[in-house]
Amino acid sequence: MISMTGFGITELQTSLGTISIEARSENHRYLDITYQVPDLLTKIENNIAEIVKKHISRGKFRIYISAKLINKSSHLDGNLAKNSLMMLQRLKKDLKLNGETKLEHLLMLKDLFTTESSEELNKNDITKILNGLKSVIKKVHEARKEEGKYLKKELLKRINKIERLLVNVKARRKKFPKETRDKLKERINLLLEDCQIENSRLVQEIAILTEKSDFTEETVRLNAHIKRFKNTMNKNTPVGRELDFLIQEMNREAGTISAKSKDAKISHYIIELRSDLEKIREQIQNVE
């Protein structure tokens, strides 16, 4: 079992300077890859998604690559500066603001200056950067595996608790016919006082109530889902969607048991059981 949360970072030296690569992932229904790279590295953009997909099958994956160049030159975007000055002056007029527009106001604008290298990365640099990217993604993958071990432990603890609660429900269910008979007999005696009711009629009424409140099939299916849930957690493939489906099915069976049950104690067990199912469902959202 693998989590969808992970982080990795590295720095490497190239002929043009230092390249920093950072990657992080979080939960998402599908595989969603986005990245930010400097213009110098547009050549490797097509390789990024391809490399990620070799290790990651699901999650929101973010990659940030930055460069600290040795030989670099800065360029002023004159047109942007002129247009920005005109817009500032128009805005000042519209808002009836006093004071003059100064150079430092323009210098605060983003993208007014661009930094470029006068050289290009060579083949060795590209190979080094791609290997660095692979290394970072592997780090993220390892972090996701470690987080997955913790999630598996927590999920197993909760699913075992649900299994114990179901045992309590079934044990309580065995007492239902006798307790129903005693309560029904006591209620009839209070209503009819000294009048006697036929024992066969009493047995018939108890049988009807027992039949209406029978949830044997639901407990059998719930047990089967629990067993499958445990087996699924041990798979080496992405299991998040399958586990989510199983939790939905367990919740459905638990809801039916709750609706059929006429016993307060069983209802309390089911409330606790469904509470743990909800906690499991929340944790599963982070499983690949």
Image (cartoon, grey):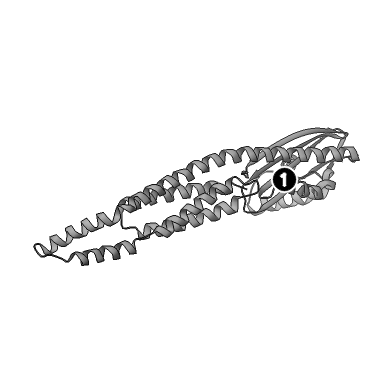
Q: Answer with left or right where residue 122 lies relative to residue 210.
A: right
Q: Residue at x 75, y 47 (%)?
A: 54
Is residue 147 at least partly visible in the picture?
A: yes
Q: Answer with left or right where residue 201 lies relative to residue 211.
A: left
Residue 245 x %, y %: 55, 56
Give the residue pinned by disc 1.
55
Is residue 118 at least partly visible in the picture?
A: no
Determine the secondary structure under disc 1. Answer: loop
Q: Answer with left or right where residue 156 lies relative to residue 261.
A: right
Q: How many marks?
A: 1
Residue 277 x %, y %: 47, 49
Residue 275 x %, y %: 43, 48
Q: Residue at x 60, y 39 (%)?
A: 147
Q: Residue furthest front?
A: 200
- Which is nearer the eye, 179 or 80? 179
227, above or below 211, in the image? above
283, above or below 15, in the image? below
Q: Answer with left or right where residue 263 lies relative to residue 218.
A: left
Q: Residue at x 18, y 59 (%)?
A: 185
Q: Residues within 10 Å of mark 1 (few under 14, many from 20)?
A: few
Q: Quadrant of the N terminus?
A: top right
Residue type at the position of mark 1: His
Q: Residue at x 66, y 44 (%)?
A: 25
- Which is nearer the eye, 38 or 26? 26
Residue 170 x %, y %: 37, 51
